[in-house]
Every structure is written in structure tokens, then in C-alpha cells.
Amino acid sequence: MNSATLSQPLPPDVRVTQFTTLVVAAAVAALLLAAAAGWVARQPLFAFAGIRLEGDVSRNSAANIRANIAAKLTGNFFTLDLQSARQVFESLPWVRHAVVQRVWPNLLEVTLEEHKPAAVWKGDEGNDRLVNTYGEVFEANVGDVDDEELPEFSGDEANAPEMLAMYRRLNPVFAPLDLQVTRLALSGRGSWEAEMDNGAVVEIGRGSDEEVLARCARFVRTVTQAAARLPRGWSQADLRHTDGYALRLKGAAGAANTPTTH
């Protein structure tokens, strides 16, 4: 008589032991692979052979950049933390933004955007800084821009973007008088004051941007006729009056109220 041998299921404890063995073996293999990969990644073969600089490098020479960041970059092609590397490059003077990328097999490519100065931010006790074209205040050697005719801003640093925007809008308003704003101040109460390239000071006062600009435009339209009656011209104008403005004679301590024309 033929008989068939039926396979018996393994006992539960045996199945658990086999499963545990497989899991442990897989974990050990993964650890060994990770260790091997880490060891390979740390080999000198993958050290960066150079840094390729792109973008703006007018304020920082390539040699100066490499000298300043060489000791701060740690890691090779595989182990370098790109976020940390970006922060290292952005800590350099004049650098506003950096994009850091790996280029196979051993290059680090860095694209830099430099600050473009638009104004000098007057700080306390001579702690002057610069304002870029985005209205951001940044640290740099102000002496590097001594040869550039930059306006001076003073006020709350948080208002720097607003001040840059106002400066850009005020200059065309005063252009018919052949005047250009060289200093702009915004008080804590929101009152504007501008100094012109001829030394004259204009107290503009408070208000919305449109109100401030309209007040200045009315002044520009009428001041030439009003100043014609002043033998020495004017050195200060106060536009904060409701129905006119006051002009101060050059070399005089007093002021004469002069109505505007609407």
C-alpha cells in the first residue's frame, strides 16, 4: 500500500526563532553596508579638488573667499553639509545669498549674490552700516564705498525698506529745483526730514506716502517764486504747516511763513 508523507507545520517557537534570526541577519547586513559606505565616503578619493565660484565676486576676490572659508568647510563630496556650507559663504562680507552645489566627481560650485549698496545707515557712535537695493541693512566696511555718492538714512532699522522706497520717489519730485536728497531721516513718530545736496533741510512731516509726496510737490511748484523775495535764498523749509510752509533765510535764525499755492 502506498503511503504519502505529509509535512507537519513547524512549532510556533521554531517559527519565531527563524524569523528573529532573519531580522537580526538583515540588520547586521544593513549595518555592515552602512559602515562600508561611510568608510568609502570618507576616503581622500572624494575630497573636494576645488571650488568653482559663479555670480557676483566684485567685492570679494576668489583668492580672498577661498582663504576665508577653507578652514570652515568640513567634509568631502558625500559628507559635506550643504546648508552649513551655504551659511559659511553667506557669513562673508558683502555676500547676500549663496547657492552651494556638488559637481561630480570632486568640485564644489558656489553661486554668490553680493549686496549692492544703495545707502549708508547712520548708527549710534559711528556704528555705520549699509543698506542694499532691497532695503536690507547689512554689515560691511563703509570705507569700501567712500567713492560712491550714497545717501544717508537714519531711523528705526525696521523702516529701512520704506525709507529706500521714499528716497527713490522723492528725488524725482525735487528734480525741477535741481536738488537731490543726500540725507533722509524718519522719526519714531513717522515724521520725515530730508537734507539736499546744497545743504538745505526740508522738514516734511508725517502722513501717508502719497500725502508726503503731494506736500513736497506743492512746495517745489511754489518755492522758486517765494524764495525770489529772499535776498540770500533759503536754508530750511518746514512743510508741516496746514496752509503753507516756512522758509528760513540762509544765515538767519528766524523763519518767514510763506503760503503755498494750491
Image (spheres, rainbow, N blue to C red):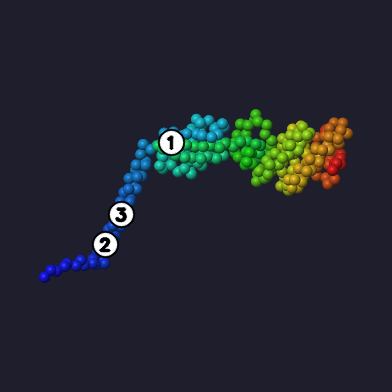
Residue at (78, 41) in percent of width and height: 216
- Left or right of 100 on screen, residue 1: left
Q: Secondary structure at mark 2?
A: helix
Which residue is tagged 3? 26
Which residue is tagged 2? 17
Binning the other alpha carbons within 10 Å of mark 2 as few (below 14), some (14 to 19) or many (20 upward) gives few
Q: Are marks 3 and 1 in contact (CB under 8 Å)?
A: no
Outermost residue, right side: 229
Q: Amino acid at mark 3?
A: Ala
Q: Which mark is residue 107?
A: 1
- Residue 71 seen: no
- Left or right of 68 on screen, residue 105: left
Binning the other alpha carbons within 10 Å of mark 3 as few (below 14), some (14 to 19) or many (20 upward) gives few
Q: Disc 3 versus disc 2: distance between alpha carbons?
A: 14 Å
Residue 107 percent across, percent down from the top left: 43, 36
Q: Earlier in the sequence, mark 3 or mark 1?
A: 3
- Total tally of numbered discs in the picture: 3
Please name whichever residue, 96 or 19, is drawn nearer the observer in this view of the structure. Answer: 19
Is residue 56 placed above or below 155 in the rendered structure?
above
Outermost residue, left side: 1
Q: Earlier in the sequence, mark 2 or mark 1?
A: 2
Q: Amino acid at mark 1?
A: Leu
Q: Amino acid at mark 2?
A: Thr
Binning the other alpha carbons within 10 Å of mark 1 as few (below 14), some (14 to 19) or many (20 upward) gives some
Q: Secondary structure at mark 3?
A: helix
Q: Disc 2 versus disc 1: distance between alpha carbons?
A: 49 Å
